[in-house]
Amino acid sequence: MEVHLSTWLITGAVLIAGLGLDVFVIGRNVHEPSMKEAGASVTVFVALAVVFGLGVWATAGSRYAGEFFAGWLTEYSLSVDNLFIFLIIMAKLAVPRALQQYALTVGIILALIFRGIFIAVGAAAINRFSWVFFIFGAFLVYTAARLVADYRSHGEEEEVSENALMRFVNRRFPSTDDFHGRALTVARDGHRFITPMMFVIIALGSTDLLFALDSIPAIYGLTQEPYLVFSSNVFALMGLRQLYFLIGGLLRKLVYLSLGLSFILAFIGLKLILHALHKYHGADWAPYDGEIPIWLSLTVIIGTLVITTAASLAASGRLASDQATSGQAVSDQAVSDQAVSDQAVSDQAVSDQAVSDQAVSDQAASDLAASGQTAPDHTATGQTSPDHAAPEQTASDRITPGQAIPHQGTPNQADDRSPR
């Protein structure tokens, strides 16, 4: 692909101006972008990448357009995976939501710097040494195996541990626990302290460096044209900050993204190895003589991304459904337990009422018994009512307990009684 210097200068100026507009003008206002703002920005930058690819098709042919689209999609996918690591870093370091945009801006600038360096180094190495493709290919296959191993060992619980640079800074420099806006350092009592924002920038920068090691060999496995390598990387970084806020929650639903990327990287790694073998005339046995066509690469990349996204969303949907079913079962059990508890309370209330009624009945019986001793039934004792009172008894008529009943006779006869 023959690219004139003027084309390089115009393309570079336009791309850097667009990225600068995104980073330094739009990103200067530190705030959390709304879904509408983030969606509009991502749509514009994606549309610009598509228009650029169509322009390459119109001026250089379908082959180079295919290489651009394959490289852009691969770099964009790796950038999305990079965003997932950014999301973990932001959560671990407790970065305020409003300051995350600034941190992402710095991270994108560092990513562009690191990728630019690696693009230049990679291009120089490829032009001088064909065996570099063996190293690039082996490194991508190793990276793919590492992604699979990380997925199997950690699953969804991913952690970002402090690297050597972060441990060095944390050990050698005094720091504060609170953020002070975008400031990286703050003065207190005549001493200079670093803020948590400094640790965030270091974490993002070191992550960008590691991802540049993966992305540059990957893009050189799809095209060896520096012009397409540069443009596809810049377009992959455009709108990345807005994409972070747009699909921040969706990122955690892409549970198979690392597996899909591992397959793509392994495919590109094998493609690089076959390309190196072709250079040394050792790939005559391979399909296409070791030179895998770009249309096949583009098909594999798009198909993998579509299958990975669909499978991830389906798995996340099933997980959400299972959690909802489990939550409903727990809720139903809670309702059942509450009903049993209410029934027990009701039964206890009935039992307490019965006990209370029995106590009242017993008390009434006790009171009635006590009343029966002090005011006996007059009818049972043979007494008459006050209206028919008998004449008053004399002393001789009164009989005490134990006294013999007198003989019914004359008084004299009563005196002559003798014991029997």
Image (cartoon, rainbow, N blue to C red):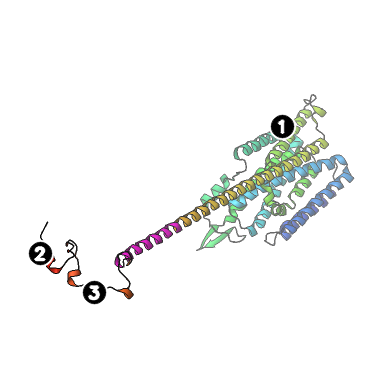
Q: Which residue is mark 2?
A: 416
Residues at marks 2 and 3, CA–CA distance in whole angstroms: 27 Å
Q: What amino acid is labelled 2 in the image?
A: Asp
Q: Which residue is mark 3?
A: 392
Q: Quadrant of residue 302?
A: top right
Q: Tell me, yes or no, whether the highlighted magenta stretch contains residue 124.
A: no
Q: Is residue 77 left or right of residue 2?
A: left
**What percent of the width, then of the height, locates residue 30?**
67, 61
Q: Which residue is mark 1?
A: 134
N-term-proximal mark, 2 vs 3: 3
Between 329 and 115, the one nearer to me in the picture: 329
Q: Give the quadrant of the C terminus.
A: bottom left
**What percent of the width, then of the height, locates residue 159?**
59, 45
Q: In this picture, which residue range is highlighted in magenta? A: 353-376
Q: What amino acid is labelled 3 in the image?
A: Glu
Q: What amino acid is labelled 1 in the image?
A: Phe
